[in-house]
Image: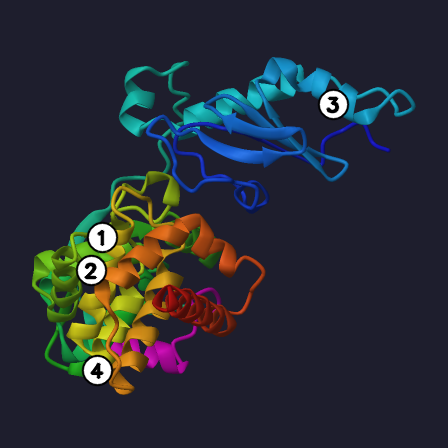
Amino acid sequence: MSGVPSQIWICAAGKEAPDWIVERMTTLEIATDGSFEIEATDGKVTVERGFAVFEFNSQVFACPPRMVQDKLAAAAGEEAPAVVDLSEKLGRMREQQIAQARPKSLRIAHNDRPLRLKPVIGSPPAPQFIAVGDLLVDDSYQRSIEGGASRKLITKIAENWDWRLCLPLLVSRRAGELYVIDGQHRKEAADLRGDIPHLPVVVFDFDDPKAEAELFVAANRSRRQMSKLDDFHAAIVAGDKKAVAVNDVVTGAGLAVARIAAWQYWKPGEVVFVGAIQRLLHSQGTPVVAQALGMMGRAFAGSTLVGGGAIFEGLVTFVQQRVRDEKPVDEDLMTSVLAGVGIPGWKEATAEVDSGNERADVMLKAIADAYAEAEEE
């Protein structure tokens, strides 16, 4: 029997809880201070900021860090080897997680140490326009553009050329020739069009492909991929018809589309399943989707909609089936059914299901059974 926890986690604002903790949560209502309740081995515990949650010999405990040693000793028993002193490790974990969760502006304003500035690398680039035909590509490190996805992207850029989206290409001057480090798709699209003679570039001087490849890797790894929710909200502002339609039906139900995907940051009434809403708007129509979202909005008012996507898809399917059978759903009754089971109850209905399709079927059956039982009463 080991004297060391197999997993350990410190609760900090903005720090997402791992699955092995989420599975033990007894409520999906996350308090404004970030606390929540779990079913630990020794009973229900309210996990507050700074608490340590750890797994030891298939048992789970939650407590302030100062009590971890006592909990470990009690769980290990008299015949187990001495438990490891985790005081120093827990202190470091807490400091790291608090620092990671702290907003960047606060980390800068209240920095715990001075910045460790490294020497600046390279020289400032030289912005200029270069003839497209003078730009070369080194296949030794550049990604291949022969695949279907790359060819489609190049065609799309060529067909919809927009100078506002054409950032300067990163180019290396090597032995008198110019090699594209970043911007190969834009270069190929300009070639394909034939009416873009020059492209904006910033030129760096390198001696060999290795240095170029290092910059290529650094440039690609430094990018933060735009999240689906970021893209959705930007599309609304841009007037994208599909995004606006989704937003209209969501807000019409008294709900809102969340800005952040991590559930710890969701506010009551926020949804993230915009893909499912858009798909079902197309396949089932606005009335059915609006009805389902409206019932969810009323039933779960004030609740955080964790797992709401599965409920929504099951509910839309059930409503559509009742419409097809000419037995429309009684909205007041269904709202009461949804509220009676509650978010944790509906989540529990699919807790043992891994497959997406199976989860949808299980949720649909759970909704149908609960509604039928309510109708009989």
Tell whether position 5 is magenta.
no
Question: Which disc, if any, is residue 294?
Answer: 2
Q: Helix or strand or loop: what does disc 1 sit on?
A: helix
- Tell me which amino acid carries mark 4: Leu
The residue sitting at 46% across, 52% down in the picture is 345
Pick whichever of labels 1 and 3 is earlier in the sequence.
3
> Are discs 2 and 1 less than 8 Å apart at CB?
yes
Q: Residues within 10 Å of mark 3 (few under 14, many from 20)?
A: many
Question: Which disc, if any, is residue 192?
Answer: 4
Q: Helix or strand or loop: what does disc 4 sit on?
A: helix
Q: In this orientation, which residue lies closer to the viewer: 87 or 353?
A: 353
* C-alpha distance separating marks 1 and 3: 45 Å
Report which residue position mark 1 lands on.
Answer: 298
Report which residue position mark 3 lands on.
Answer: 72
* Residue numbers of the magenta segment: 139-155
With respect to residue 150, does 94 lie above or below?
above
Question: Which disc, if any, is residue 178?
Answer: none
- Tell me which amino acid carries mark 2: Gly
Residue 135 appears anywhere in the view: no
Quadrant in the picture for residue 162? bottom left
Q: Position of residue 333 (x, y in %)?
A: 27, 62
